Amino acid sequence: MLLGDFLKEGISRLKSLYPPEEARDIVLTLCESRLGTGRYTYATDPDYSIAPDSLDSLSGDMDRLSAGEPLQYVLGYAWFLGRRFKVTTDVLIPRPETEILCQEAIKAFKDPRGRILDLCTGSGCVAWSLALELPGSVVYGVDISKAALAVASGQDLSSDRSSPVFLKADILDSPPLFPCGKFDLILSNPPYIMESQKKDMRPNVLDHEPSLALFVPDEDPLVFYRAVARWAEALLAEDGTGLVEINETLGSQTRDLFLGFGFGKVEIIDDFFGKNRFVKFMR
Ligand SMILES: C[S@@+](CC[C@H](N)C(=O)[O-])C[C@H]1O[C@@H](n2cnc3c(N)ncnc32)[C@H](O)[C@@H]1O
């Protein structure tokens, strides 16, 4: 089958799920990844024909995509801060706004050999990015999900001394003791979407990404921020910084929660859409 025909057919199969430009981008990215073709190969080499065995596996990919599965799960990876992270349906697909969480953390980080704790680590994208950007730091990643921790610790990134240490813990419980003592930086992107916000979400997220990673009850949407504040009370060093990603509709409530725990210099930081997306606090 000609690449151009495959693209046309693929885009048409996705048209009920995605806007046309996004559908096109998904099918082109799939072909780039599986066939090694370029963005414009269908135009520069109109006779490019897909070999029968590649076509079989691409058709399988298209079946998964047209059933609504996100492209990153089909490919088995997602890009985050310029690195390729393995993802499975046990972990949240890393989001672009979480890249800002890491960039803010790097900005706030004074000691290149400091200690960093990433709560609710999922794929480990935050823990790994900080460990690799701040070599010499000691990084721990914590999650309740054993399956997510297997993905985080199995990332095919550097396995030298900058690898984070991943631990299973429920952050709604009291924090354990860590061999490094306290932390200079505690950060977290915990579940923060209220059940009532589900109606605004796309089915490809709702049906495929782990609900454990996403949702909190409407009656207590800040449950995980109270937990982060309790862990930070016990584990944040003097002068240490905390940074959390938040629900854009709960900016001032989340800020007040950290103020209520006695943290200082509490500030809300916006994302690239101008939405309240992070809260930073200090010991
Ligand atoms: C929003 S995801 C964030 C994943 C990753 N840090 C990222 O930014 O892509 C939240 C993570 O919190 C974990 N989680 C949910 N409840 C938890 C709990 N009680 N204790 C620890 N981790 C929890 C989930 O397993 C999930 O991996």
Image (cartoon, helix red, strand yellow):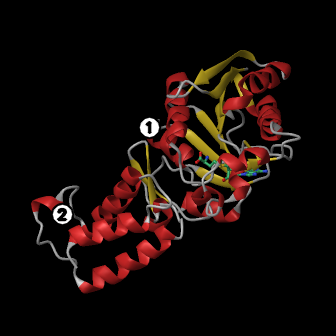
Task: Please name the residue that numbered disc 1 is placed on.
Answer: 133
Q: Amino acid at mark 1?
A: Glu
Q: Nearer the viewer, mark 1 or mark 2?
A: 2
- Residue, x 76% and y 53% (percent of image)? 169
Residue 130 image point, x, y percent: 51, 39
Residue 191 picture location, percent across and down: 71, 46
Residue 56 vertical placement versus 250 (above, below):
below
Q: Nearer the viewer, residue 159 or 215?
A: 215
Vertical placement of residue 4 versus 179, above or below: below
> Dividing the picture into quarters, in which one does residue 225 lie?
top right
Question: Is residue 88 or residue 29 the one in the foreground?
Answer: 29
N-term mark: 1 or 2:
2
Say whether residue 158 is visible: no
Q: CA distance from mark 1 to mark 2?
A: 38 Å
Give the crowd class for mark 1: few <14, some 14-19, many >=20 residues within 10 Å: some
**Residue at x 57% of width, y 55% of height:** 123
The quarter of the image holding the N terminus is bottom left
* The C terminus lies in quadrant: top right
Residue position for label 2 = 42
Q: Amino acid at mark 2?
A: Tyr
Residue situated in front as seen by the camera: 134 or 208:
208
Q: Is residue 167 visible?
A: yes
Identified at 40% across, 52% down, the residue is: 22
The x, y position of residue 193, in whole percent, is 72, 44
Q: Give the side of residue 130 with respect to residue 264, left or right.
A: left
Q: Is residue 234 left or right of residue 16?
A: right
Residue 154 appears left or right of 193 = left
SS at mark 2 in the image: helix
Number of numbered callouts drawn: 2
